[in-house]
């Protein structure tokens, strides 16, 4: 069994001010949370992808790359990469690079996502939601079998 933390890097308004933190400040807190999880010996730190105003995690692989440079042992994962609106080759390349930078600690978790309003943001028709996910999942699975 593995124990870990996953987050969507919520940036909801603070009770004291009624305003959210500056996104850079929220990301710095996220870095500190990951460092603490690593120091405490947790197994996994995962960041979910969101494209909404109240989250600062629209680019989990970039965030995890920074966390990789600030941690030593903890596995780093997406929780979840919204594959239906991503390019499978780029996802594979980003996480393969993260795996190199982190010395083998990267993992990808893919899924459909919990919100659909961002899907058209990437130019996709919601009517093709299921078909696109299945097609892109098959591409991602095939890419991992290629020997470079």
Image: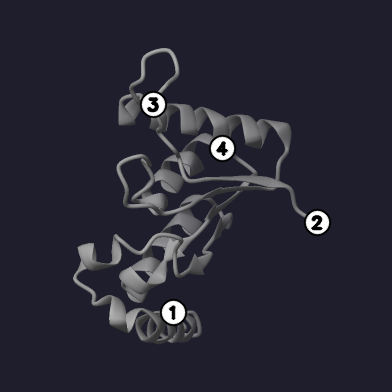
Give the SS element for disc 1: helix
Q: Which image quadrant for residue 28?
A: top left
Read off the residue under disc 3. Answer: 13
Screen quadrant of the C terminus: bottom left
Name which of mark 2 and mark 4 comes first in the sequence: 2
Residues packed near mark 3 inside 10 Å, few (<14), some (14 to 19) or many (20 plus): few
Reply above or below: 26 against 5. Answer: above
Read off the residue under disc 1. Answer: 140
Q: Nearer the viewer, mark 4 or mark 3?
A: 3
Q: Nearer the viewer, mark 2 or mark 4?
A: 2
Residue at x 30%, y 82% (from the top left corner): 127
Give the SS element for disc 3: loop
Q: Which image quadrant for residue 42?
A: top right
Q: From the viewer's perspective, is 36 left or right of 61?
A: right
Read off the residue under disc 4. Answer: 71
Give the SS element for disc 2: loop
- The disc placed on residue 112 is none
The percent coordinates of residue 107 (x first, y second) are 55, 61
Name which of mark 1 and mark 2 comes first in the sequence: 2
- The disc placed on residue 1 is 2
Residue at x 38%, y 52% (from the top left corner): 50
Q: Nearer the viewer, mark 2 or mark 3?
A: 3
């Amino acid at each position: 069994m593995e124990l870990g933390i996953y987050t969507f890097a919520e940036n909801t308004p603070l009770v004291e001010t009624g305003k959210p933190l500056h996104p850079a400040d929220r990301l710095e807190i996220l870095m500190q949370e990951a460092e603490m999880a690593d120091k405490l010996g947790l197994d996994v730190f995962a960041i979910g992808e969101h494209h909404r105003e109240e989250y600062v995690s629209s680019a989990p692989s970039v965030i995890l790359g920074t966390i990789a440079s600030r941690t030593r042992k903890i596995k780093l994962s997406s929780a979840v990469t919204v594959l239906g609106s991503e390019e499978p080759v780029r996802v594979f390349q980003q996480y393969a690079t993260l795996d190199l930078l982190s010395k083998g600690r990267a993992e990808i978790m893919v899924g459909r996502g919990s919100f659909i309003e961002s899907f058209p943001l990437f130019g996709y028709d919601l009517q093709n939601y299921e078909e696109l996910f299945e097609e892109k999942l098959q591409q991602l699975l095939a890419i991992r079998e290629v020997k470079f």
